[in-house]
Structures are given as C-alpha cells and as structure tokens.
Image: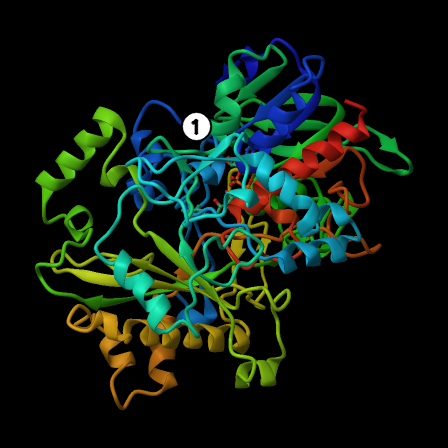
Amino acid sequence: ALFTDPSQLKQTTYDFVVIGAGTAGNVVATRLTENPSVKVLVIEAGVSDTGFDSDLIRIPFLCGQTAINTPFDWNYTTVPQKALNNQVLPYYRGFVLGGSSSTNYLAWTRGSPDDYNRFANVTGDSSYAWDNILTYFKKSEHHATPEDGRNDTGEYIPSVHGFKGPVAFSVTGNLSNIDDRVLATTQELSDQFPFNQDTNSGNLLGIGWQQNSLGNGSRSSSSAAYLTPVLNTRANLDVLIQTRVTRLVTTGTSNGVPEFKSVEVAQTSTGPRFTFKANNEIILSAGAIGSPQILMLSGIGDPAELAKVGVNSTVSLPEVGKNLQDHPIVSTQWVVPDDAPTRDIYTLGEDPAAVSAGLAQWHANHTGIYANVLGNHMGFFRLPQNSSILAQFGDQSAGPGSAHYELAWVSGFMSVSQPFPTSGRYFSNINVVNSPTSRGSVVLNSSDPFTAPLIDPNFFDTDFDLQVMIEAIKAAVRFASAKVWDGYILHPYADLATALAPNATDADIVTYIRRWTGSIKHPMSTAAANGAEGKGVVGADLTVKNISGVRIVDGSVFPFIPSAHPQAGIYGVAEVASDKIKAAYHL
Ligand SMILES: Cc1cc2nc3c(=O)[nH]c(=O)nc-3n(C[C@H](O)[C@H](O)[C@H](O)COP(=O)(O)OP(=O)(O)OC[C@H]3O[C@@H](n4cnc5c(N)ncnc54)[C@H](O)[C@@H]3O)c2cc1C
C-alpha cells in the first residue's frame, strides 16, 4: 500500500528497505516482492505521480516541461561551470514515484556492447557483459505498436527485443515532415550517416528510428510499468512517499566491518525522525546524486571532506561522490520556410488553438502529436579513425562499437538551454558528447539532509570532450548540407550564424558551445562498481565496500557512463541486481 507519513506504517522492520522509488528502485522492489514471503518497504522523498499536474508526466509530448519548475523535480543547480563561462546550470532529477523515469525525455537506448563488456571487465563479473545482460534488457521491456497503428516493420529488429517485460517501448506514432529527408540523407551520405535498423541491437552506430519508453500514447515510467500495477495487490509491499532518508544507521558489526541495516527518515529538516530496519539489507536506489549524498550523511566517504561540513566519518570510502560523468548537450537550429509544417505551432506559444486541440485529442484517446515525443530519429557516431583528436588523445570510448557523439533531429525549435523564440519555423538537432572523459563530483554542502549537495558535472574539463563537441557540430552541419535539404534549410538561427560564418574558425564554434551547453541529465558513476580491492564504492555484487548491509542499485554504480541515454541500461542493471539479491537470500 501507499503511505504518506511514517507514523502510518504498522511495522518498522522489513526484509528489505529500498531507498528511492525511482527507475532502479521500483525494479528491485517489484522483483523482490514477487515472492509473497518477502516484505519490502520503499521510501521515496518525492511525491505521487498521480493527481495534481500529473498530465505533465503522462503526456509524452510535454516531457520537456515535466521537470522545469514543477513539484516533480529536486530543483538542483550545479556549481559554476568553469568551461561554460562560470554558468550555473539547472540539474534536473525526478522527485516523484518513478524518479527520473517519470520526468525524462523517454529516449530508450541501451548503448554499445563495449559499454557493458567494459562494465564486466572492471568488475570482473560477466553478468554485466552484453551477451548476458541482453536477457535482462529484454526482460525489462515490451514492444508496443506505435500509437497511430503504423506498421513499424523495418524500424526496429524484433529478435533483439522483449515482448513481455514491464516497460513499453515504441517508435514514433506521429510522422514529421522531416522524416523522409532524414532517411534520404542516410542514403545520400551513407558513408558518414548510415541507416541502422535498430541502434539497440548491439550495433549502436548509425541513424535509426528513435525508440521511446512509451506505449498506448503514455509515458511508461518505472512507476507505471513496475510499481503501480502491483502496489495494491501485494500485501508484502509498502511504499512511503514524501519522506526523505536522512542517513543510514549502524546496527553493529558484521564480519569485522560496521553494519548499516537501519535507516533514519524525516519529512522536514526539523521534523521528527523515524527509523526502519531491514532484516536482510538496505538497497540504496536514490540515484547518482541521492545515493552518494546519503552515504556521506552517514559518515561514509572521504573523511577530510566530511569533516569540513561537520559530519563524523564512520567509514573511509574516498570515491563516494567522485567520478561523476554526464553527457554535455548543445543544440543547433536552422530557420526553415514559414509554411513548413513543423512542430513549432505546439511549442512556441503562437497557436494556442492547436495546443488545445492536440491536448483534447490526447485526453480523448491518447493519440495524436501529444502521444509522442519531439523527435523521430537519432544517430550515434565515431570520430574517423584518422582523426587528429584520436591521434592526440587516444580513443577514450569503451571500444570500436561505441559512440563518441550523438546527433538527433527535431522538426521544430529544440534546446535545453536557449530561450525559445516566439515565432518562426525551425529545424533543430542536438549534439551530445557520448564518451566524455571529464569527471565531476557530488560533495556535501551541509550536514543537513535537506540541503542540496554541491553538484559539479565539470563539463569540458578535458580538451578531448570539447574537441568531440566541435566535431559533432561540424557533423550536424554536414548532415544539414546534404542536397535533400536544399530549399528547406534556409540559414542558421541566431548566433549559430556567427559560429558557422564562412570566415569562422573553431574558436567561434567553441564560443557557441561555452554559451549554450547544458546537461542532458545523465549523471552517473558517483558510486562506481569496481572489482579491485580499494577501488570504487561498490563491488561486483553492488554491495558497498568496507561496510555490511547496504547494496546500491541505480545509475551511480556504472563504472563508466554508457555511450547512449542511460535509462534502458539502468533498468537492465536493476534486473541483473534483483536476480543477484534473490540468489544471495535463496528467494
Ligand atoms: C529531465 C530528464 C531527461 C532525461 N532524459 C532521458 C532520456 O530521454 N533517456 C534516458 O535514457 N535517460 C534520460 N534521463 C536520465 C534518466 O532518466 C536517469 O539516468 C535515470 O532515470 C536514473 O535512474 P536512477 O534509478 O539512477 O535514479 P532516479 O530515477 O532519479 O531515482 C532516484 C529516486 O530516489 C529518490 N531519492 C533521492 N534521494 C532520496 C532520499 N534521501 N530519500 C528518499 N528518496 C530519495 C528520488 O526522489 C528518486 O525518485 C533524463 C533525466 C532527466 C531528469
């Protein structure tokens, strides 16, 4: 059942306590409670995903608005970003049942086999290797027919997908006016921009139809897909929302190390504290910001850093909160003819009647433009083998099947950082560095669990990342220069024109990048798994090192960020972890 106040719960001891009802937490809680004798409590800081304003979560086309200034987000900001003119960036994280899977942009990508084989190598555990985790990717998903009933044969490869798992995925149910041109470019410039029938197949590279966590015209979050369908029918599953875990509490020692099988919770900074205990273990699934924050609040981290904010160190584990990796993103836009049927009528505020009609159609039968996301195609690319960047820095990706950068196309204005214009028609693409080498951190700002930590994605700390972003933009320009766009793409928008002027240099592109880069919202690796003693935060089985009783299952345990959008990978790892936990307790 669902509870909104710790005092409502009839028991204080469970077999497992899961911290965070987010993307990964809901997978673990749902899989463990498949066994009716296993009692699980999930504690979520955020709010319900139903009721007030929850259309923002359910309606896919509104995904760009789900996080911004809504009750569903933590409203974090970064520390000033040195390489971005000291800008402070918004840093969205889901604060709601489903976590960031309830607020994200729905892109459903796994990454490359190299990404997962590297995970297996670093941990010494083959269960994360592509050939093995593929079973779990399939277990987490089911193919859904595009909402317009369109035949999607040839737009994905059925044999690499699941058909019975909880999360619905589908390609677009709303074709856009640029789709034919995007596909024609994959023919005209096939050597640079080849078509790929399914970028989730183990062959990541090339341009494919974008898959999204979406079915029946609605977002398929971890709450909608895993948790909600069983919440009221499983007597062994309790979910407590609007309640924050403030720290892990020691419960003695086990095998010579401190044991933490209890959690302290509160609803406000000064409100009463409650504790809940796990007979077996605590599963920390608070995400790449929340999980290291909770460890540090519990005295588990770098002792010198903890001392600075007055937290007593209980266990030295210096890599907690280090190694933060994220994908920087910058958009580029071009102006197209005024009569082009782009999606701008829905997003620039010019045509309220079109918006009302679109929303009315979605409410009537979950169809139409609002039952889909903004873009229909995305592509993953490598620098050419003879690239001077590779010669200078070496290949920093997970391997030859991994992407250095990503491009995705939208018929309409799209940006995560620029103010939207109020009129006009546009063609946009996003440019993303997929195998970044910059590393940031999450550090406590205060011993108060209700104070946000200091978050530093440290974008473009390395020149490699900046050079790759320059190449991504140049590739986007080559794509937009294909003959099939003649007469459609008119000229670059606003200061992109300066960056791309005939006499412009890379320095002008860098000026554009430093001004407009944002986060694609993929922070990961802040509690990285590592099989070697003394390295990382968790071991191959994802249990926290140097203590007993706590396992981390979320995006923070990935040793490296995958070279694609991470949610599908996080679901896969959470499915693997659920089986590991079941095996550990013979469930
Ligand atoms: C706006 C946005 C757009 C994105 N777009 C995409 C995309 O298109 N495709 C993609 O693959 N990925 C995308 N991502 C990233 C992806 O959604 C996340 O990487 C992924 O969902 C993270 O899963 P997680 O389980 O690690 O953490 P989360 O899903 O964030 O779950 C963590 C949960 O823990 C809770 N929590 C945190 N601290 C505490 C505490 N102290 N006590 C109790 N509960 C706590 C949080 O409220 C949250 O519910 C996006 C993310 C955002 C925010």
Q: Does 88 sit left or right of 126 as displayed?
A: left
**Could you tell me residue 49's position as x and y percent?**
40, 27
Q: Which residue is mark 1?
A: 47
Give the left or right position of residue 506, taking residue 158 as reference.
Answer: left
Q: Quadrant of residue 114?
A: bottom right
| Above or below, 298 relative to 191 | above
Task: Please name the amino acid that badge 1 sits on.
Answer: Val
The x and y percentages for residue 9 are: 58, 12
Q: At 64% from the left edge and 54% from the top edge, which residue is drawn?
A: 308
Q: Residue at x 67, y 21 (%)?
A: 276
In this view of the protein, which residue sits in the foreground, 196 or 90? 196
Looking at the picture, tell me which residue is in the foreground, 120 or 282.
120
Residue at left 77%, top 33%? 549
Q: Position of residue 263 (x, y in %)?
A: 67, 28
Residue 432, quarter of picture: bottom left
Report x, y in % for residue 354.
12, 41
Q: Which residue is farthest bottom? A: 503
Q: Residues within 10 Å of mark 1 (few under 14, many from 20)?
A: many
